[in-house]
Image: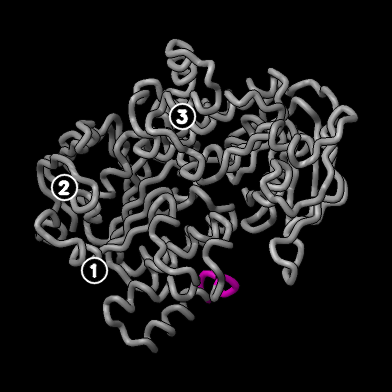
């Protein structure tokens, strides 16, 4: 049993994140921590797994005990033996370059017999239908595949307490179903599970209680039955996402067509001996519209974005707009990609300086106005990498907009965003399209897609499987893809 008593925490920079938290979790209970981005969900999970105060230092008050023993007096080694964690960014917890070695890493460090480790890996990868991910280079995997490896590693070690921070953030819907099955299996085994999550729809039959945080405090606690009864309006008031996806309808107002962005010979492979990661002979996109790119993990979505942007030097495809050909240099000047892992493109020491890297003409008043549009103006003097996942995402998008590029590509822009911020993000994307930007949104987020997409491109194995407008007439097709 977990007992959290009068828990408060201030980071070393003085920011108070947790304020007088009291919560009891029974053995075998599944708890979902939810609430607005920056409300303290990740900080609370980090106190449970020992990252706070052992790695992130600050002032901590109160106590956390597991099975009657305070974890604040234990070493990180002892804490990690009883609890397994999956972080929002799985890259931050990998130690090996090979997937099989990564799965074996933790039990090897605890002296588990080699044959037992091999058996556990074989059984886990069979149950999760992920044997194809064995003996792969980790950093060649998609974001969702990395997340799946991180979840599988926890299963292989056999922890009784499992702590997950936004486990679905980079997963497609098929993999989310695998994750839900994994949670159901852990629950049937009597494991205690703490999940910090914004996406709620896949948890409705798994979670016992939903704990809503607000500004570092416990706001409300709902039983599963009570949470299911909340109306869409009440969920929106709490800043949460939808729990029943079939109730969501596509946006009504669509942007006017202003011409075409034409792509030819989009053929690309990362290594000569590998099959094509991208195999598109011709594709036409409406300018000034929001085009959602969907597909399962590894289908070529991010590769498409990298080639269109000009990041891949070996790519030889052709892009035309209004009769003008864009070579790689012109694409770099006209197209901007906000990456799935925004940590790779935040460079400055302060939030305001990050914005100035994209537009050096901005003065302090303009910076405050821009940051206010993305609800991060109060963090103007903080280091960008100290922000929450959702806040970093919004800063990266604000920086992208300031580059004044014609074409903007957002790779999973709603990853780590709560319901209110996701809806704000859709409004921002729609507004940018109304200003004449051509927008691509690579997403696994059904809610975001219906809120902003004018048309959909469905990629599989590098090919365009389908292309269609996002309207009521095609709603069934997108629901079939998301298995809703």
The part of the image, by quadrant, that contains residue 309 is top right
How many other residues sit within 10 Å of disc 2, few (<14), some (14-19) or many (≥20)? some
For the N terminus, the image quarter is: bottom left
Q: Which residue is mark 2?
A: 4
**Marks 2 and 3, Cα distance to the nearest angstrom?**
38 Å
Instruction: Give the overall secondary structure of the magenta segment.
Output: helix
Q: Residue at x 61, y 43 (%)?
A: 443
Q: Position of residue 135 (x, y in %)?
A: 54, 76
Residue 481 in view here = no
- Looking at the image, tell me whether mark 1 or mark 2 is earlier in sequence order: 2
Q: Is residue 129 magenta?
A: yes
Residue 138 lies within the magenta run: no
Q: CA distance from mark 1 to mark 2?
A: 19 Å
Start-end of magenta stretch? 126-133
**What is the x, y in percent for residue 102?**
43, 71
The residue mark sitting in front, 2 or 3, is: 3
Q: Which mark is residue 354?
A: 3
Q: On the picture, is 319 further left or further right than 194?
A: right
At 15% across and 41% down in the image, what residue appears?
A: 7
């Amino acid at each position: 049993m977990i007992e959290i008593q009068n828990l408060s925490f201030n980071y070393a920079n003085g920011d108070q994140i947790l304020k007088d938290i009291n919560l009891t979790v029974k053995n075998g209970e599944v708890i979902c921590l939810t609430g607005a981005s920056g409300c303290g969900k990740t900080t609370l999970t980090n106190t449970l797994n020992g990252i706070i105060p052992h790695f992130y230092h600050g002032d901590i008050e109160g106590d956390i005990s597991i099975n009657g023993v305070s974890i604040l007096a234990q070493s990180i080694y002892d804490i990690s033996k009883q609890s397994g964690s999956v972080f929002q960014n799985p890259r931050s917890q990998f130690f090996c370059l090979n997937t099989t070695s990564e799965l074996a890493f933790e039990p090897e460090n605890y002296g588990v017999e080699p044959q037992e480790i091999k058996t556990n890996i074989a059984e886990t990868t069979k149950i999760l239908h992920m044997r194809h991910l064995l003996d792969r280079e980790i950093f060649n995997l998609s974001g969702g595949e990395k997340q799946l490896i991180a979840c599988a590693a926890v299963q292989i070690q056999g922890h009784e307490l499992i702590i997950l921070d936004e486990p679905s953030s980079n997963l497609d819907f098929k993999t989310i179903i695998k994750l839900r099955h994994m949670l159901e299996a852990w629950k049937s085994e009597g494991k205690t599970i703490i999940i910090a999550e914004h996406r709620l729809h896949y948890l409705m039959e798994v979670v016992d209680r939903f704990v809503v945080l607000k500004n570092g405090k416990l706001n409300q606690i709902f039983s599963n039955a009570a949470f299911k009864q909340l109306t869409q309006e009440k969920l929106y008031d709490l800043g949460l996402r939808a729990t029943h996806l079939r109730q969501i309808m596509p946006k009504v107002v669509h942007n006017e067509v202003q011409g075409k962005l034409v792509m030819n010979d989009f053929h690309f492979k990362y290594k000569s001996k590998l099959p094509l990661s991208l195999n598109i002979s011709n594709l036409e996109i409406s300018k000034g519209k929001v085009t959602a790119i969907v597909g399962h993990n590894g289908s070529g979505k991010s590769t498409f974005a990298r080639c269109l942007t000009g990041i891949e030097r070996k790519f030889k495809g052709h892009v035309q707009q209004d009769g003008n050909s864009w070579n790689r240099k012109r694409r770099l000047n006209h197209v901007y990609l906000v990456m799935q892992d925004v940590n790779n493109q935040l460079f400055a020491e302060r939030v305001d300086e990050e914005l100035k890297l994209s537009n050096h003409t901005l003065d302090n008043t303009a910076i405050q106005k821009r940051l206010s549009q993305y609800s991060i103006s109060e963090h103007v003097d903080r280091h960008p990498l100290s922000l929450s996942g959702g806040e970093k995402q919004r800063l990266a998008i604000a920086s992208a907009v300031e580059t004044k590029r014609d074409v903007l590509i957002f790779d999973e822009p709603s990853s780590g965003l709560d319901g209110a911020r996701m809806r704000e993000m859709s409004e921002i994307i729609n507004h940018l399209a109304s200003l004449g930007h051509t927008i691509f949104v690579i997403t696994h987020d059904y809610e975001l897609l219906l809120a902003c997409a004018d048309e959909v491109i469905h990629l599989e194995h590098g090919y365009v499987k389908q292309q269609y407008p996002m309207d009521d007439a095609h709603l069934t097709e997108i629901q079939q893809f998301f298995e809703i």
